Structure formats: C-alpha cells, structure tokens
Amino acid sequence: MNIQTALVAALFGYLLGSISFSLLLARFKGIDLRGVGSGNLGATNASRALGKWGGLTVYLLDAAKGFFPAWATLVYFEQLDLAVLAGMAAYAGHIWPVYFGFRGGKGVATLTGVVLAFHPLSLAWAALALLVTVIPTRWMSLGSLAIGVSLPISAWHYSLDKPIFYGFLVAGLFLFWTHRSNIGRILAGTERRIGEKKS
C-alpha cells in the first residue's frame, strides 16, 4: 500500500460516509433531526422522527455507504488493507461528516455495512449479540456495545486476516467511544429504553 493510493481509498470512503441520509430525509419532510430525541444523526433517532419505515430506510442507506466503499475498493485495487481503510474511513465519515459540521451519528449501521463487505458471518454473530442484549434490557445502546465486543472476537475466532481483525477491533473501540454518554446513563439507570417516551 503506497501513500497516494491509501489517501485515495480513505478519501473515497470518508466522503461517502459523510453523507447523512437521516438528516437529508428528515429535512425533506421539514424536520430538523438535531432537535428530535437525542439529536443524533443515526437510524435509531431517525425512527423517532420518521417512523419505523423511515428509520429502516436510513439504516439500509447508512449500511450501504459502509459496504460500497469497502467492496468497491477491494474489487478495484484487490488489496485487503486498502479496502479495510476505505471502510473504516466511511465509518469515520458517518461519525464526523465533513458536509454537516463534523457532527454525525454513532456509526452502528455504517459499521454493519463494512462488516458485511468482509465477513458476513461476523455480522450474523454481531446481530445475535445485539438481540440477546436488547431483548431483555430494551437498551439499543447496550446492543450496540455488544456489537463492538463481538466483532474482534469473531475476527479472532475465524482467524481473519490481520487488517480485518485490527479494523474490527478499532471499530469496536470507536463504538464504545461514541456511546460514552449512553454508558454513563446506563450506569446511572437513566438510559431510555425502546418504546419508552422521553420524560
């Protein structure tokens, strides 16, 4: 991997990842998503403003912007490390979007698209971790943290290539960082549960 090619891959992923579909779809409906719920530009908060189908649409679009740069870079350059870089850059772009003042979402949906591009079975295990965590607690944020834990474990268990393992590990750490306020509320017992109205 040379520096120029790495910069191209990273820029490609980052610029795609910076597209905030939740904010754009909400604006189309005349809604300022930053003033709804948590103010977060992700699928979970989008569902509060746009309904379940709107939230699902945002989730799929956010996942696609993670999947496409990783997949396209792998196909074009045929270098796994470049593809992981592009995928991680898309993930970072969702969190810090250049088009929207570097204030984005927490990156869960975009990360699932990246994982799908490299190892669908790891995504299946991540989904299972999400379900077994969210169903009893109704804390979506806790499910996101479970995904962050499951990804590097899956990469290690399946002996995936080092770029994927380290990419999943860094992504998992980022999930904990982006959910740091949620972690504080979980520990304090004030985190909102699915279906719970804001008091």
Image (tube, rainbow, N blue to C red):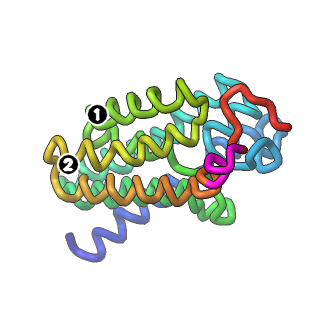
- Residue sitting at 44 percent across and 41 percent down? 146
Q: Position of residue 17 (x, y in %)?
A: 50, 53
What's drawn in magenta, residue-wise? 184-189
Mark with earlier residue (1, 2): 1
Q: Position of residue 92 (x, y in %)?
A: 48, 59
Q: Is residue 18 visible?
A: no
Per the image, label 2 sits on a secondary structure element best described as helix
- Residue at which label 1 appears: 120
- Residue sitting at 74 percent across and 46 percent down? 38
**Which label number is shown at residue 11?**
none
Helix, strand or loop for the magenta stretch, by majority: helix
**Which label number is shown at residue 156?**
2
The type of residue carrying mark 2 is Trp
Q: Is residue 170 visible?
A: yes
Q: Position of residue 69 (x, y in %)?
A: 38, 50
Q: Nearer the viewer, residue 40 or 10?
A: 40
Residue 194 sits above or below residue 76 on the image? above
| Magenta run includes residue 188 | yes
| Magenta run includes residue 164 | no
User: Is 48 on the left or on the right of 117, as rendered?
Assistant: right
- Residue sitting at 66 percent across and 60 percent down? 103
Disc 1 and disc 2 in contact, CB within 8 angstroms: no
The type of residue carrying mark 1 is Pro
Quarter of the image that includes the C terminus? top right
Q: For the residues marked 1 and 2, what is the alpha-carbon distance in whole angstroms?
A: 15 Å
